[in-house]
Image: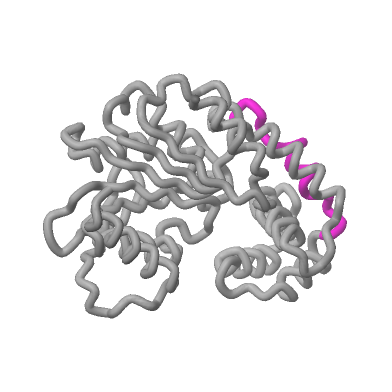
Amino acid sequence: MGLKEVTRITRLMARVAKGPGTLPADHGVARTTERLGGCLTDRYDPTGAFRSSLVLIHGVSFKGKEDERLQHFATCLALEGVRCFAPTLPGLTRAISEVEDIDALGSLIQVASDEGRRAVGLVGFSYGGSAALLAAARPENAGLVEFVATFGAYHDLESCLTYYQEQDALRPAEGSRSRDSFLYQHLVYAHIWRERLGLSAEQIEALEHILKRYCEGSSPQEKEDFFAQHLVDLDLVNRHCEWVDRSALRRITPAGQLQGLDCEVRLLHDPSDTMVPVTEAVALREAVE
C-alpha cells in the first residue's frame, strides 16, 4: 500500500467518524434513485471517474437505504472515487429476512458489475452481511464479487434464536447495553407479529414511530414505557421462536450454503455485540476458511 492509499483511507475514516450532517452541502456527489435488481436503489456517483464499485447492504432497519448513517458512509466513499449502490431490501425493512432479498441483491450485483465487466465489493451490516455472503456464494454471481466485508453478520439463525431466548431469560438491567438490545428485540418481534398479537392501530403507529427513530431519536425512557405498557407480558421472544417458519430460516442462513464463495471475505464483529453474538463470526470464519 502506497502513501496515496494511506492518505485516502485516513481521509475517509476522518469523514465517516464525524457522522451524518457534517459534510459540506456542495460535496459534489450525485445521488440518484432507481429500481435496480428489483428493489429501489440509491446510486452515489463520484464527481470524476470512479475507481471501484461497492454495494452497501443495510441490516434490520425500517429506513432501509434512507438510514442517515448509510447515506453518510456512501457519500464519504464516493468522495474517494468509489461508486456506491445502496438498495432497500424489503424483507429487512420489515425485520423479516427473506430469500427474495437475496434474489434482489444477486440481480443488483449483476447491474453494479456492469453486467460482469468489473467485479464489485459487498459491504453488509448485521443481517445484511449474511445476505451479502449468501448472494456472493450463488453460482450465477461467481467472478462478479471481488470481496465481501461484513460487520456483525450471523452464521446460523437457529443458534441466534437460542441466544435470544437465553438473553431474554436474563432480563438485563435498565440502562445497560444489553437492555437496549433486549428492548429492540421485543419491539421488532411485536411489529413482526402485530396482527397475530392483535395490536391496535394506535399501538402499531406508536411502535413504528419508535422503530423508525430507534438509533437516532428514541429515548431510553420512551422505549421502556412502551415495553412496560404494551409488551412486558407477551413473552415475545419465545413466541417468535415458536411461530417463525424454520424452513424459511434455513433458506436465508449462511450455514451450509457458502461453498460457492470464490472471493475474499473479511469478517468484523464487536466482541460485545448483544444483537448477534461474536460466536457467529467464529462460525463464519470456519465456514469460509
Marks counted in the figure total: 0
Q: Is residue 203 left or right of residue 121?
A: right
Over which residues does the magenta segment extend? 232-248
Above or below, comparing residue 160 to residue 222 in the picture: above
Q: Is residue 237 magenta?
A: yes
Question: What is the magenta segment's predominant secondary structure?
Answer: helix
Give me the residue at 45% from left, 46% from top: 124
Q: Is residue 15 magenta?
A: no
Give me the residue at 28% from left, 62% from top: 7
Q: Quadrant of residue 286?
A: top right
In percent of width and height, residue 171 lies at: 85, 56
Q: Is residue 214 left or right of residue 107?
A: right
In percent of width and height, residue 83 lies at: 24, 53
Give me the residue at 79% from left, 43% from top: 165
Name the colouring of the figure: one colour
In percent of width and height, residue 213 lies at: 57, 69
Give me the residue at 46% from left, 52% from top: 58
Residue 204 visible in this rendered orientation of the protein: yes
Residue 91 visible in this rendered orientation of the protein: no
Task: Pick the residue in front: 121 or 132.
Answer: 121
